[in-house]
Image: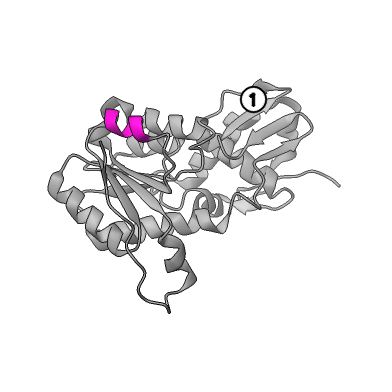
Amino acid sequence: MPISSPETENNNEQADSDSATLKKLRILVVENDFLLCELMKYSLESEGYAVDVCVTAEEAMSVLPRMYSLIIANVSVLGQDSAGLGTYLRQNGETADIPLVFISSSETEEGIISAFESGVDAFLKKPFSMREMVARINAVMRRYKRTPSVSSPKRISHDDLCVNLVTREASMAEEPLDMTMQECQLLGFLMLNRNKLYSAEEIVNELWPECKLKADPHVSIMSMIDSIKSQIGIYSLYIVADDCFSYAYVEAN
């Protein structure tokens, strides 16, 4: 069974609204290092989060039907299930909105790309301080809070081209497209903000601010744009780029 702890009481009546919101949030930690678990649990509870801990991938998957506000998991504990966890979360309607943070002792560019494509929101590289962990988690939670599900669209479409912004899947004429989650995010972002140009740096900062890649962002975004355009037929004509490699989805009124 996961280790549960009661939510920390808020004794400060002057606490700001963000702190009050954090009191309602529960985080799942997947980590088999007992000492690190205790440090993470204590630090997160001190921030007002409620924390559950699982020490195996099987244990974590068994409790995932429970709704969490964020999951932070050690890649080595998940093993071969690490990429599968992100995909499972994003494709399951009940868990599609849960942010996922990976802990890893190595941080290769290929591993980062694979993780972000499967739906991971941020990385923590070992060794890390508790202050860094809390700051990273709070930053991820603020990003999700800025786009509450109540007011944000779940789907964006142009005729029969549709992107599900929650599950990060795309379809055309009701047929699923073979896009990565990052490609779906990029297409959805451009369609949602149609008729506005974004540079590669702006796109990365908006969609994947935690992603620090060695590759030139222009190369990465251009590659994704080429892949997207190859799959969306006539709708590829609506994706334009200027001479400075800024991109937009342009639809005339």
User: What is the span of residues highlighted in magenta in the rendered image?
Assistant: 58-63
Q: Quick check: 73 left or right of 166?
A: left
What percent of the width, then of the height, locates residue 242? 67, 48
Question: Can I make out residue 132 in this image?
Answer: no
What percent of the width, then of the height, locates residue 119? 45, 37
Where on the picture, by quarter, is residue 136? Answer: bottom left
Q: Secondary structure at mark 1?
A: loop
- Residue at 28% over, 28% down: 58
Under mark 1, the amino acid is Gln
Q: Is residue 81 magenta?
A: no
Q: Quick check: 23 left or right of 31?
A: right
What percent of the width, then of the height, locates residue 248? 68, 46
Q: Is residue 62 magenta?
A: yes
Marker count (numbered): 1
Which residue bears the numbered disc 1?
231
Is most of the magenta stretch helix, strand or loop? helix
Bin the neighbour count of mark 1 within 10 Å (Cα to Cα): few under 14, some 14-19, many 20 and up. some
Tell me the quadrant of the picture where the N terminus can be found: top left
Q: Nearer the viewer, residue 18 or 24?
A: 24
Q: Nearer the viewer, residue 133 or 54?
A: 54
- Residue at 34% over, 30% down: 62
> Above or below — where is 246 with respect to 162?
below
Q: Quick check: 243 left or right of 2?
A: right
Where on the picture, by quarter, is residue 190? Answer: top right
Q: Nearer the viewer, residue 186 or 30?
A: 30
